[in-house]
Image (cartoon, grey):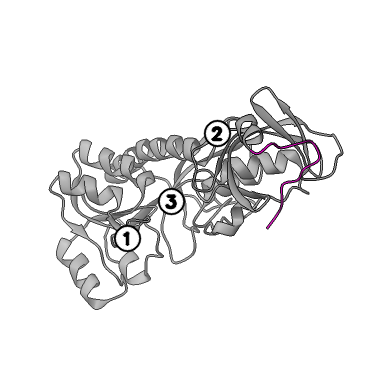
Amino acid sequence: MRIVFFGTPGFALPSLKNLVASGEDVAAIVTQPDRVKGRGHKLSIPPVKEFALSQGIPVLQPADIRSNEFFTAIDGLNPDMIVVVAYGRIIPPDILARPPKGCINVHASLLPKYRGAAPIQWSIVRGETKTGVTLMRMDEGLDTGDILLREETEILHQDNAATLGARLSEMGADLLITTIRNIAAGTVSAVAQQGDTSYAPIIKKEDGKIDWAASAEDIFNLIRGMYPWPGGQSVFQGERIIVIRSQVADADARKTAGSILKIFGEELHIATGRGILSLQELKPEGKKAMTGAAFARGRHIREGMHFEYQ
């Protein structure tokens, strides 16, 4: 089947690799423009572009996917199907209507829960214990299309957005090939989405701010869900820090939220609105990651000092 692939970040890469390995005719990939990143202002190219170039697959990076120029480019590729995996932009109806086999999307949630841009992060932040991948036919709505195939997985206690995302990306890549083969064989069965709907908006930097008045469990989930970006953020005596790893040390203790209780081994125990959170690894701004205890010793932290919320 002749396929045009829309995708941008690393999450999309296993799906693209599976398409190529399975022998499908990947006519081109469409990805977001290269971006300038970091303090050195170096040009960063999307992971799917790097792989496509290594395979000799044409790459399109339109600034405007609603332009007549881009529509003409898609028509020239004459795809049977369009596959979309974390492209990062809404696909316009004029594109959705073009391929005869339709447009299918790999979405990292159990739809209709967590429609939107950041389902992996918000499923962890909101304390979900399971999630999954949904393959759907795309329509004009936001992740509202009929379901073709889906698979569940447990959200492990040690998962963060990076580890869960890696697992879901591989699951989605395998389901994608099964779905395409079912479509080609005419054995696919699409069903309308059913159940409670929720949304997963795009992540902003401020979403990572730790409110110490929340429960230890909620802060633990926030830190996991916001890793690696923007990170669980706090401030200690004017110094900004990112909490990388934490653990709930006590779920019910009642102390002054944000107050430092003690160093326990290599960890630093902090009071929350309900419970005690153990900071296992954190990274002060501009410095290397360190244990909670190393952070405390380097700053002569004493019991009763406070982390701030800004």
Task: Give how far across and how far down residue 69 sits, in percent.
Answer: 21, 75
Q: Earlier in the sequence, mark 1 or mark 2?
A: 1
Name the residue carrying label 3: 136
- Nearest to the eye among marks 1 and 2: give it: 2
Badge 1 is on which residue? Answer: 35
Quarter of the image where the C terminus is located: bottom right
Tags 1 and 2 touching, CB below 8 Å: no
In percent of the image, x 43 and y 37: which residue is there? 166
Classify 10 Å Cα crowding around label 1: few (below 14), some (14-19), many (20 and above): few
Contact flag, marks 3 and 2 (Cβ < 8 Å): no
- The residue shown at (37%, 55%) is 38
What amino acid is at disc 2?
Answer: Met
Badge 1 marks a residue whose secondary structure is: strand
Q: Amino acid at mark 1?
A: Arg
- Which residue occupies 15% across, 66% down? 76
Q: Are marks 1 and 3 in contact (CB under 8 Å)?
A: no
Q: Is residue 170 above or below residue 114?
A: above
Magenta-span inclusion, residue 80: no
Task: Name the spot of residue 240 as percent of width and height, x first.
Answer: 60, 51
Q: Position of residue 223 (x, y in %)?
A: 61, 42
Mark-to-mark CA distance, 1 and 3: 29 Å
Q: Is residue 291 left or right of residue 3?
A: right
What segment is highlighted magenta in the picture?
A: 299-310
Compare marks 3 and 2 and give the one earlier in the sequence: 3
Q: CA distance from mark 1 to mark 2?
A: 30 Å
Q: Kindly report the distance in space between the C-alpha atoms of the residues bearing marks 3 and 2.
A: 43 Å
Mark 2: few/some/many CA within 10 Å (<14, 14-19, 20+): some
Viewer-closest of 265 and 15: 265
The answer to which quarter of the image holds residue 206 is bottom right
Locate residue 102 relative to residue 126 in the image: left or right.
left
Residue that carries the numbered disc 2 in the rendered image? 290
